[in-house]
Amino acid sequence: MLSEFLGGNAVFLAIAAFIILCIFLGVRIVPQSEKHVVERFGRLRAVLGPGINFVVPFLDRVAHKISVLERQLPTASQDAITADNVLVKVETSVFYRITEPEKTVYRIRDVDAAIATTVAGIVRSEIGKLELDQVQSNRSQLIERVREQVTAMVDDWGVEVTRAEILDVNLDDATRAAMLQQLNAERARRAQVTEAEGKKRSVELAADADLYAADQAAKARRITADAEAYATGVIAGAISANGLEAAQFQIAMKQVEAIAQVAQGEGKQTILLPISAMDAFADVFKLLRGKA
């Protein structure tokens, strides 16, 4: 009886242990950052996503655990020749993540090396289409074209390229020295152009100033002429109103004043007056007598 009891318990324990083992082997908990590739007899059966998953114990096995986190390839440097035959050294960096692990596992052996080689070839091809100045000034467009081509080429590997960056474009010493000389020459040319434009502007301003001064002088002469014409008109009106005698009187008075100024002195000089001067005095006396 005891032996039968022990034998029955052993069978029960064995069955219980087998069930526990099946549960342990059949339940798979996948982390959020991973996907598991399950094989059955060496063939792909399923890809397990995050959470609790069930497989057939002893038949299915998790062959690959693939991280779906974004990865960064090591910074790579490759030589490229531009369209104007300038040798440049380009530093690139690529970020990607695996979206379809079954393709990555069964279609490519070393995905990092494959992506790095693909990026290097595309970068050389794209830079070969551009001149050096275009490479420097249109880097964002170049990066976008590289990213699009890399994305299209790695699609069969179950990989998504999230970013492809061109970190730097370096030149050799000879090219850098030549570019520096060209830059200095361009700066000198711009300085000469600026100086010439300044001189031209100075001449233009001086000409404008001369023109303005001539215009103001012409305006002043016009005003003076207008004033003289107005004074002449006033005199003519006075003569017309008062008669010729008023004009003769004014002329005679001017002659007398002139003679008086000539006569001023210390009394030692001798003054000779023409007969016409005496006539001026006579004309004044006549006009005064006539007015009286």
Image (cartoon, rainbow, N blue to C red):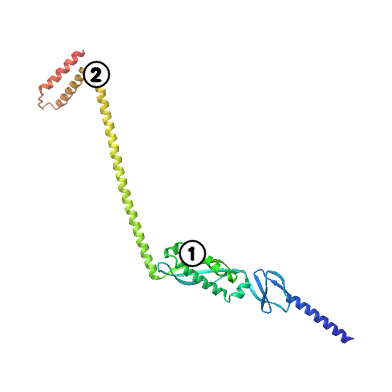
- Residue at 87% x, 84% y is 5
- Residue at 24% x, 22% y is 236
Give percent across and percent down for residue 158: 60, 70
Q: Are marks 2 and 1 in contact (CB under 8 Å)?
A: no
Q: Amino acid at mark 1?
A: Leu
Nearest the viewer among 224 and 162 is 162
Residue at the disc numbered 1: 142
Is 117 drawn above or below residue 238 in the view shown?
below
Nearest the viewer among 195 and 110 is 110
How far apart marks 2 and 1 lie (CA) works out to 96 Å
Q: Dot 2 surroundings within 10 Å: few (below 14), some, or many (20 or more)?
A: few
Give percent across and percent down for residue 72: 56, 70
Work out which quarter of the rendered image holds the N terminus and state it.
bottom right
Q: Which mark is residue 44?
A: none
Work out which quarter of the rendered image holds the C terminus and state it.
top left
Residue at the disc numbered 2: 240
